[in-house]
Image (tube, rainbow, N blue to C red):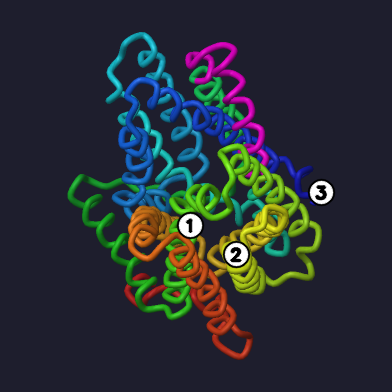
Amino acid sequence: MLSLLRQRDFALLWTGGLVSLAGDWVLYASLPFVIYDRTGSTVATAGVIIAELGPGVVLGSVAGVFVDRWQRKRVLVYGSFVQAVAVALLFFVPSGGGLWLVYVVAAAVATASAFTVPAEGALLPALVGAEELLTANALTALNSRLARVCGLAAGGALLGALGFEAVVAVDAASFVVAALLIAGVEAPGGARAVREDAASALTGFLREWGDGLRLVRRDRGLGVLFVVLGVMTFGGTMLDPLSAPWVRDVLHQGPAVFAWLMAVHGAAGIVGSLLVARFQARLAPRMLMGWGSIVAAAMLAVRFNVPVVALTFTFAVAAGITSVASSVGAQTVVQQSVRDEYRGRVLGALGASGSLLSLAGAAVGGLLGEAIGIVPALDVATALVGLSGVVVLRAFSPRRRTAGDAARPPARAR
């Protein structure tokens, strides 16, 4: 694990991601309070979530085409600078700027992320050896958990001590620092020199976009991955609008316990990332993805139906570890399943479907909680998480077609 962090290019990419994510969480810890303070409306606060997820739904698969056409390192560098400029616009909000500017900034940052997220996932396998890919993904999961824990704490402290302008300055600066770090990565290949007129460029774009969609549709392995990750995402986000009501109305605890549960879950995710990285040689990605989901579902089922505070915190620790194992396994399976020239399109399409299903899962979770009750709705979401794990273990069994077979492109793309 430490040897991988000593590899210059991976270390620059990893550190850049850690810095920018920490800056994001600094902002996310503060922005809801600022919006609610200005409006007194939970609907206005929820609007930021929609602004953040919407661009991914619309642009995800389209952005993936450009990720495969452009040099991925440049996508990350330019995307980070765009996000820094967008976040800097929030300086005008405390000085009387319209609140609409918050939604514009959220959408602009999310638009850039629709390009940078698949670019990072597609670039990573080119920086590390195949035998190090699982460890690299575990370390990437680690920096997201570290950023969340540190950023949330720093965001609240900065907002209280120095005001919203300091929060904006830190987040904008984090994107600049990330861009400078990633600019130092020596990335092999990843771009095609394309000189086309407008008509040829449009035709080429549409052809490559179609090739990526046909790859997903025709290849059984990728098709199964899309279904499994879709079910996993939908079930997981169904939990989000139900968690706080469950803590209040079923566990009979207040917001302090809810906040501590989130903190414990995030800290356990750090431990989970380190464990996966440490024992990656003994772990198959499909096993992590499959059994991680199944074990998580079993613990959630007990946690939601046996509302005891001590048990809840115990399972929050375990869930933090298993969620990392499952997500790292899923990311690695996808990266191993697709050839480099198609990786951006597939990851972009996964991002688009994930954003759409996140919106749908949150909406269905809230509606189902009202219709059948909090605990039954949580049980439905838990069952979907467990089902996704069972499907992975069956579909990618060594006796069946391996995920690596999904690397074959459709006939037209050869």
Instruction: Read off the residue under disc 2.
Output: 300
Question: Would residue 1 be counted in the magenta stretch?
Answer: no
Judged from the image, the secondary structure of the residue bearing numbered disc 3 is helix
Does the rendering let one see residue 357? Answer: no
Q: Amino acid at mark 1?
A: Leu
Q: Amino acid at mark 3?
A: Ser
Q: Which mark is residue 3?
A: 3
Residue 320: x %, y % from top left = 66, 54
Residue 365: x %, y % from top left = 39, 58
Judged from the image, the secondary structure of the residue bearing numbered disc 2 is helix
Q: CA distance from mark 2 to mark 1?
A: 10 Å
User: Disc 2 or 1, which lies upstream in sequence?
Assistant: 1
Please determine whether, in this image, residue 343 is positioned above or below residue 16. below
Callouts 2 and 3 close, C-beta under 8 Å:
no
The image quarter containing residue 32 is top left
- The magenta span reads 143-167
In the image, taking residue 167 as reference, residue 275 lies left or right, namely right
Q: Quadrant of the C terminus?
A: bottom left
Q: Which mark is residue 239?
A: 1
Please determine whether, in this image, residue 142 is positioned above or below residue 296. above
Q: Amino acid at mark 2?
A: Leu
Residue 207: x %, y % from top left = 27, 62
Callouts 2 and 1 close, C-beta under 8 Å:
yes
